[in-house]
Image (cartoon, helix red, strand yellow):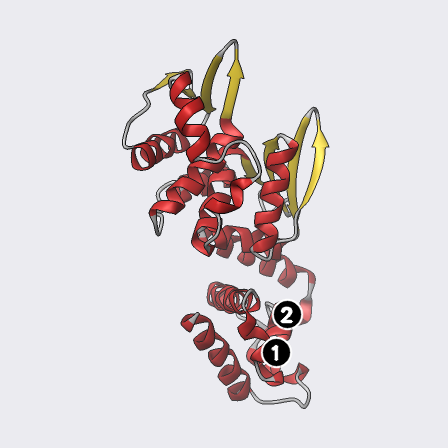
Amino acid sequence: MSFTQNIKENISKIENKCAFCDVAELSALCKLCTNYQGGQVFIATENEAVAERVYTLFKSVFKTTVDYKNKNGNFRFYPDFDFFAETMADKLMLFGEDYEKIVERDCCRAAYIRGAFLGGGSVSNPNSRYHMEFDARYEVYANQLLNILKDCGISAKVTYRKGRYIVYIKGYEQIAGVLGIIGDFTAAMELYNTTIEKDLRNNANRRRNCEVANIDKIAKTAAQQIAAIRKIEKTPEFSLLPDSLKEMARLRKENPFDSLKELGEKTNPPIGKSGVNHRLKRIAEIAEKL
C-alpha cells in the first residue's frame, strides 16, 4: 500500500467533531469526485475506503443512502439527478461563491481539507521528495481549497496541468502541517522521522550528538509544539504573548529538530534547558485553552 493510500485509509475512519464537519467533508469529496456524463451524475473513486466514507457521509448528511457499484475496483455512486440538483448541490454548496458558510469553524475547515484529500489528494513518499497535491479539476474549486488552506496557515499554489487545476504544496513542514490538520498524525510523524533521518545522514555532527532511538520522541514533541504555535498564531492571542514566548515560537518553527539545549543557545540572551522547557510548556498551555 502506498503512502497516499495509507493516509486515506487512516483518515477515512476519523469521526468528525460536528454535523457541519460531515457537510464540509462531503462537499469537498463531491467537488473533486463528481462526474457529469450523458445527462448522468455520478461520484467515482478507485479507493474502497473512500467509497465507504462517501456512503457513511451521505447517510449522516442526507439521512438516506446512495448505493454504489464496484466494477474492477472503480466505485461509482449514482444519486438521482433531481435529488442532486435540488438537494445535494444546495446543501453541499457545490456551485456559487457561498462555500465559506460550511467552513466557518476550524474543525469544519479541517474536515473540508480531509474530504479534498480523500477525493483527489496524493503525497509523494517522503523518502523520494516532499510534494503533496490535490486534483481540484476546476479553477473555482482550486481557488476555494487554496483559500481554506491559507486560513489554516498552509502555503499552497495552483498550477494548470493537462486540462485540470492542481493545488500543490512543497516542503516537509507544510505537508506535515496538512497531515496534522486532516488527522493523520502517524503519517506526519513518519514524515518528520524521515526528514530527521535524512538530516542525520547528511550531518555527521548531528548524528554523533543525537541518539537515533529518540527520533520518534523528538519528532512527536516538535510536531505538537509547532501545532500549538500555529493554533495560537491564528488568534489575536498571539499578539498578546510576551516577547520571550514569541521568540521561542519563532525559534521552534525555524528549528524543529533542535534539542532544548540548542534552542536555548539561540535565544537572546541564551537560556538553559529548563528555561526553554518552561516557555514551550507555557505556549502549549495557552494553545490548550483556545
Viewer-proximal residue among 191 and 74: 74
User: Relative to residue 175, is residue 183 drawn left or right?
Assistant: left
- Against 175, residue 2 (above or below) is above
**Residue 1 showing in the rendered view:** no
Q: Could you tell me which residue is drawn at 59 percent across and 57 percent down?
A: 153
Q: Which of marks 1 and 2 is nearer the N terminus?
A: 1
Label 1 CA crowd tier, 10 Å (few <14, some 14–19, many 20+): some
Query: Pointer 1 and pointer 2: residues touching (CB < 8 Å)?
Result: no
**Residue 9, quarter of the rendered image:** top left
- Say what amino acid the circle numbered 1 marks: Lys
The percent position of residue 128, horizontal first and vertical second, equals: 64, 44
Residue 208: give x, y in percent of width and height: 61, 72
Q: Is mark 1 on a helix, strand or loop?
A: helix
Q: Seen in the image, is 268 located left or right of residue 36?
A: right
Residue tagged by mark 1? Answer: 246
Q: Give residue 255's mark.
A: 2
Residue 81 in percent (x, y) is at: 42, 17
Q: Quadrant of the C terminus?
A: bottom left
**225 versus 181 height, above or below:** below
Q: Residue at x 66, y 84 (%)?
A: 267
Front-most of residues 286 and 24: 24
Q: Is label 1 or label 2 in front?
A: 1
| Secondary structure of the residue carrying numbered label 2 | loop
